[in-house]
Image: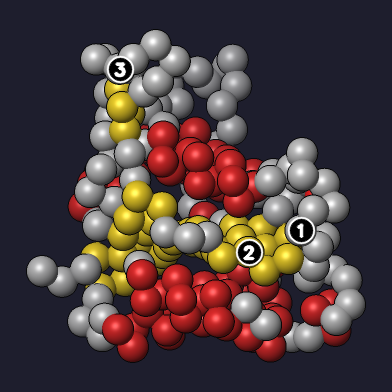
């Protein structure tokens, strides 16, 4: 069966200047070498109305609707792999990624508390394999209280997905990476990308 892969762009940077877009493109190039038949579906959260909507008291009653929630949950059920590119923005995922997750993390659709042990849930997206590709301005370890890579890994696993080894391109705001263009910067983690692409 042909792999159907959803590629999510969660960076708020211009496409040509985005480190996570360059990392995602490098990953896709490597992945295609092993799976040339795969079909890619692109979801750019910047140009997506749903990803601009934040949950508030005012919209709580209508937030999880067919167009904004169910359509994207159906999209996750329709593909068998997800590649998500996401920078660190203020110690966490970008707001557009948080809004996306808010819409698809829906009880009885992507996870269930039924039949689960105390303090545990059952993920309902067991068919999904996820590749996380993250970037951050600071080198890894400068502030471990903000670990968007682990947050994403745990969140997709909560929904039942099998998460491949994430690739983090860290230190994009400090030397030597800050002097590189995004494509060259992505190449600094090429070995990890090749390894991840082979096991994805
Ligand atoms: C609004 C904003 C907030 C940011 N917050 C952080 C942060 O908390 N920690 C960090 O290490 N880098 C932070 N950065 C830097 C980005 O993580 C870094 O530039 C990253 O490479 C951006 O990836 P992108 O080019 O794919 O958007 C921030 C950037 C922006 C635009």
Residue at 82 percent across and 46 percent down: it is: 143
Residue 12's disc is: none
Q: Nearer the viewer, residue 56 or 139?
A: 139
| Label 3 vs 1, first from the N-terminus | 3
Residue 155 in view of the camera: yes
Residue at the left extreme, as displayed? 1
Q: Is residue 90 above or below residue 46?
A: above
Residue 107 in view of the camera: no
Quadrant including the N terminus = bottom left
Residue at 59 percent across and 15 percent down: it is: 57
Residue at 64 percent across and 47 percent down: it is: 148
Residue assigned mark 1:
140
| Label 2 vs 3, first from the N-terminus | 3
Name the spot of residue 69 as percent of width and height, x first.
Answer: 37, 35
**In the structure shown, which secondary structural element does the residue marked by tag 1 occupy?**
loop
Q: Nearer the viewer, residue 16 or 188?
A: 188
For the residues bearing labels 2 and 3, Cβ distance under 8 angstroms: no
Q: Is residue 48 left or right of residue 94?
A: left
Distance, label 1 to label 2, CA atoms, is 9 Å
Distance, label 3 to label 1, CA atoms, is 35 Å
For the residues bearing labels 1 and 2, Cβ distance under 8 angstroms: yes
**In the structure shown, which secondary structural element does the residue marked by tag 3 occupy?**
loop
Quadrant of the rendered image containing residue 138: bottom right
Q: Is residue 4 above or below residue 125?
A: below
Name the spot of residue 135 as percent of width and height, x first.
Answer: 67, 63
Residue assigned mark 2:
168
Residue assigned mark 3:
116
Quadrant including the C terminus = bottom left
| Label 1 vs 2, first from the N-terminus | 1
Residue at 56 percent across and 65 percent down: it is: 167
**In the structure shown, which secondary structural element does the residue marked by tag 2 occupy?**
strand
Structural crowding at the residue carrying mark 2, measured as other residues with C-alpha within 10 Å and reported as few (<14), some (14–19) or many (≥20): many
């Amino acid at each position: 069966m042909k792999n159907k892969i959803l590629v999510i762009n969660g960076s708020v940077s211009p496409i040509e200047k985005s480190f996570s877009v360059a990392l995602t493109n490098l990953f896709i190039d490597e992945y295609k070498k092993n799976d040339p038949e795969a079909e890619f579906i692109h979801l750019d959260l910047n140009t997506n109305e749903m990803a601009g909507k934040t949950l508030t008291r005012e919209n709580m009653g209508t937030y999880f609707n067919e167009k904004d929630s169910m359509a994207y949950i159906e999209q996750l059920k329709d593909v068998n792999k997800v590649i998500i590119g996401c920078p660190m923005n203020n110690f966490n995922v970008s707001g557009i990624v948080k809004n996306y997750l808010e819409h698809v993390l829906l009880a009885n659709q992507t996870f269930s508390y039924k039949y689960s042990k105390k303090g545990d849930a059952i993920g309902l997206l067991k068919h999904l394999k996820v590749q996380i590709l993250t970037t951050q301005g600071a080198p890894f370890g400068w502030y471990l209280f903000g670990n968007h890579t682990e947050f994403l890994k745990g969140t997709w696993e909560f929904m039942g997905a099998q998460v491949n080894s994430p690739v983090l391109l860290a230190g994009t705001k400090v030397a030597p990476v800050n002097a590189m263009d995004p494509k060259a910067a992505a190449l600094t983690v090429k070995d990890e990308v090749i390894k991840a692409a082979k096991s994805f």
